[in-house]
Amino acid sequence: MTVRDNGRPSSSEVDGIAPGEGSASKSVDRPSFDDSAVSEEIEPVHDVPGGVDTATVDDHDAAVSVTGLKKRFGDGTAAITAVNDVSFEIETGSIVGLLGPNGAGKTTLIKSILGMVLPDGGTVRIRGIDVYDRPRDAYASVDAMLEGARNDYWRLTVQENLRYFATISGVDPDSVRERHERLLTQLGLAEKADVPVRELSRGMKQKVSLASVLAGGAEVVFLDEPTLGLDIESSRTLQRELRRLVEEEDLTVVLSSHDMDVVETVCDRVLIMSDGAVIADDTVDALLSGTDLHCIEITSSDLVASVVSTLENQFETITVEPRDRGSRIEVTTDSDGLYELLAHLRANDVTLERVRTIEPDLEDVFVDLTTLERRDE
């Protein structure tokens, strides 16, 4: 497995390249950090933690299988539960989105699956192989790009990075030359193939990292914020290439992102986390159709400051656009909230000059679910 984790360069050197100019590791051997800003030095996962079931399953099972995964940082009253009894399976040849607010446990979950954080309990299997029992076999077909900027060797050219990462993944780079050429073309890197990565823009570096992840023919890849720093056109190109690889080559992708449009467009299924637990797990269509949310846009010259102020205190999800006379508001709420909104407007003699309904998107569903979870605590 190759893991590109910026901000955490590896101690290895390649052709005289000093650490800090890129990071690449054939084994998972770096310290962990979680997304609650609570860090802890963790030894590599070589020994099975107490209580973890190491029984292997049929290799034809799910591409990724997680059962009862748990991870806490700290002790006593100061302890933080980053991953709380998480279980799910991911089918081969699918793209699954992982969403959650900051501190929800996404990064810790991903690093626990990859063996970069030692969990306190639970099992992880990749293509039916227990990662604690047979880590080399389990991670042989896995690649990952974690969030950050230094994911490649900056002194090497773009083409050299693709060949290098293919090689350390156990693939003859000449055998995947056509794949590399397609990746370079699709991601707009063909003209930069012989340019050292350090001379590229941030967006171009991100493209190189993505190409490197896909260069060796991994069957399961983890992408953390893959569209970070990309322009709209490059982001759409990436989305198309991911879908092509999934559909044509049975690639399995776990994608963590704050870009809801990307997740909604490319993912077959979405896991939403909050406070270390999975609070929703369904297809994008099911999440959108299963919500009771309504989004309504109202324009009125009677929406003066006092009325708008009351509405802002009453509704958590509201956007206000002041106008020369009155305001335009956009409110996302459930059915009861919609009746309350209309009743409040009527009580304040607000004439509805323009009303437009807007279909809720994945971002609306996400905010609704995570807000409801916090209310129930």
Image: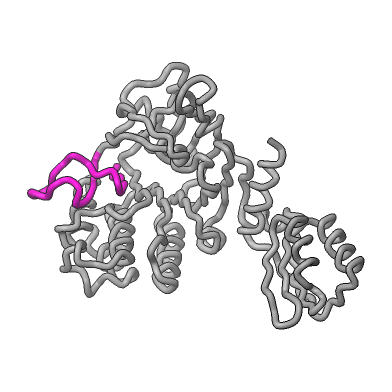
Question: Is 16 inside the magenta-drawn segment?
Answer: yes
Where, by quadrant of the figure, is residue 117 drawn?
top left
In the picture provided, is 118 more to the left or to the right than 84? Answer: left
Of helix, strand and loop, which mostly describes the magenta segment?
A: loop
On the image, which quarter does residue 85 sit in? top right
Name the spot of residue 50 as percent of width and height, x first: 43, 16
**As drawn, which residue projects farthest toward the top?**
50
Q: Residue furthest bottom?
A: 324
* Residue 190 in the image, given as x and y percentages of width and height: 24, 72
Residue lying furthest left: 16
Q: Position of residue 266 (x, y in %)?
A: 51, 61
Q: Position of residue 88 (x, y in %)?
A: 55, 38
Residue at x 24%, y 41% (from the top left corner) = 26
Q: Residue at x 53, y 40 (%)?
A: 89
Which part of the image, by quadrant, shows the C terminus? top right
The boundaries of the magenta stretch are 1-26
Q: What residue is rendered at 42% in x and 55% in y? A: 225
Judging depth in this view, the residue of 172 and 347 nearest the camera is 347
The answer to whether one can see residue 60 in this image is no
Task: Give the quarter of the image for residue 177.
Answer: bottom left
Relative to 276, residue 56 above or below: above
**Residue 150 in view (yes/no):** yes
Above or below: residue 328 compared with residue 217: below
| Residue appearing at x 64%, y 47% in the figure | 370
Compared to 262, does 123 lie above or below?
A: above
Quadrant including the N terminus: top left
Nearest to the observer: residue 211 or residue 314: 314
Foreground pick, 317 / 302: 302
